[in-house]
Amino acid sequence: MKRIAVLVEDMYQELEVWYPYLRLKEEGCDVLAVGTDRSKSYKSKLGYEIPQELGVKDAAQKDFDAVIIPGGYAPDILRRYPEVNSFVRTMFARGKVVASICHGGWVLASAGILKGRTVTSFFAIKDDMVNAGAEFVDQEVVVDGNLITSRKPEDLPAFMKAVLKALK
């Protein structure tokens, strides 16, 4: 059974957390909402709560097959935690699936894993991605090795198809 971390913090984008979370559960994966330990639950941009199931300090990268980094404004909070950046960096270095959508690219930049990679994200953070060393393309999903990126909620079907294919 594949074990997946979905990173969560306040101001997350609802669809970008819940669509992957539930879709991966539907596929039989062990999916955990991994938070910063700042709270027992986190509120979306619209106020929907998701309980933290595991704190990032207790999340051992060796125990996970993938990490999903949703968007909204949560990534701007997530990236402030060295443990989050280290978790993502180590997952990437170990060849595990690292999948980011929308503003999730902020965490990729702070984790230092974008140099020489081809990616996409929400257009507003294109400069951040490029300044972190990535080549930016405007596509619904981009797969560069074990790194999967998408732009926005409307891209979720293509994003999840790519994630599920990478997990096979």
Image (cartoon, rainbow, N blue to C red):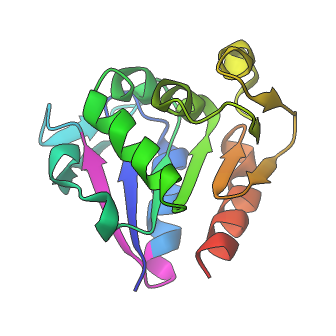
Q: Which quadrant is home to the C terminus?
A: bottom right
On screen, residue 165 versus residue 83, left or right, reads right
- Residue 143 visible somewhere in the drawing: yes
Give the vertical position of 46 relative to 57 (above or below).
above
Question: In the rendering, at what x and y percent does residue 89 appear?
Answer: 45, 42
Q: Which range of residues does the magenta coloring cover?
A: 25-35
**Vertical position of residue 95 compared to residue 110: above or below:** below
Is residue 43 at least partly visible in the picture? no
The residue closer to the viewer here, 87 or 158, is 87
Please state the horizontal and vertical placement of residue 105, each as a whole percent of the image: 59, 31
Picture residue at 62% right of the left edge, 42% below the top: 101
Residue 108 lies in what quarter of the image? top right
In percent of the image, x 58 and y 75: which residue is there? 167
Q: Position of residue 29 (x, y in %)?
A: 42, 79
Q: Is residue 30 magenta?
A: yes
Left or right: residue 82 versus residue 141 is left
Quick check: 16 left or right of 80? right
**Which of the pair 12/61 is nearer the observer?**
61
Of residues 50 and 62, which is closer to you in this image?
62
Total count of labels: 0
Q: Which residue is located at x 40 percent, y 86 percent?
A: 1
Residue 152: quarter of image: top right
In the image, residue 6 sits, relative to residue 2, either above or below, namely above
User: Residue 62: x, y in percent?
Assistant: 32, 66
Q: Residue at point 64% right, 58% down? A: 146
Q: Is residue 33 magenta?
A: yes
| Residue 119 image-quadrant placement | top right
